[in-house]
Amino acid sequence: MARPDGRRPDQLRPVTLTRGWSTHPEGSVLVEFGATRVLCTASVTEGVPRWRKGSGLGWVTAEYAMLPRATNTRSDRESVRGKVGGRTHEISRLIGRSLRACVDLKALGENSVVLDCDVLQADGGTRTAAITGAYVALYDAVTWLAERKALTGKVEKVMHRSVSAVSVGVIGGEPMLDLCYAEDVTAEVDMNVVCTGTGDFVEVQGTGEAGVFARDQLDALLDLGVAGCLELADAQRKALNL
């Protein structure tokens, strides 16, 4: 089945990770998955939430938002509505969980990092792009802490593994990697795969949008997702000069 942009079923969209995109945060990355663009910033604060004080452990959390005209039609800001939507909450929590999987919170010490992921332009895969970019922003923020001797461990101990994410789905009966919006809205099966740089799973979110799916389809989607995440991990290493 031909894809809108002519890619192979197992091919990622062009991926770009631009570090230092924003001046003020301790870490910032503009991540681009094709036409999807997400600004990820990492802000460091000394101390941890009240419920974590005295534990010797750090904290990493995330917030996700979409600009009003990130999509084809304008959406009101959730701050104007006075209520954060369920989708936003869910994605924010996913990003936070995913990034905590790559951090040794004890080695981070009692420091907090907030990852803000703002979608500038949406064309499918905004949450997976956010996770992939937020890892790089977080790495730079931890490096900033290390340069100020504010860590209890070295950068490589704090950031003891990498994390990236990609979408996969079944379209016209065929498993495909990294869905753009036009593909996402027609997918029979839609899935997000979060992996470490060695291919271990952090989280898998999947659903049959237009019916059920078989075990062999699930296996094919997971294989595609892992391969995509390994490519993204390589892009992260190159962006960080590791």
Image (spheres, helix red, strand yellow):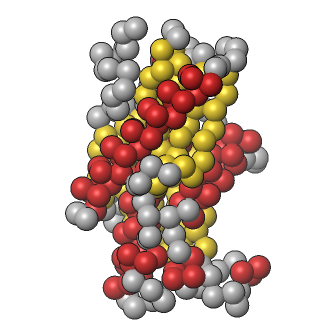
Q: Nearer the viewer, residue 10 or 80?
A: 10
Left or right of 116 in this view: 142: left
> Who's the residue at 46% across and 34% down the image?
223
> Who's the residue at 76% across and 46% down the image?
83
- The answer to whether one can see residue 67 in this image is no
From the top left corner, tell me how far across and down residue 50 is, in percent: 74, 81
Question: Which residue reaches farthest front?
Answer: 216
| Figure label count | 0
> Who's the residue at 29% across and 34% down the image?
14
Q: Quadrant of the N terminus?
A: top left
Q: Quadrant of the C terminus?
A: bottom left
From the top left corner, tell me how far across and down residue 234 is, in percent: 30, 51
Q: Nearer the viewer, residue 223 or 26?
A: 223
- The answer to whether one can see residue 234 in this image is yes
Left or right of 225 in this view: 34: left
Above or below, 184 against 17 in this view is: above
From the top left corner, tell me how far across and down residue 171 is, in percent: 51, 14
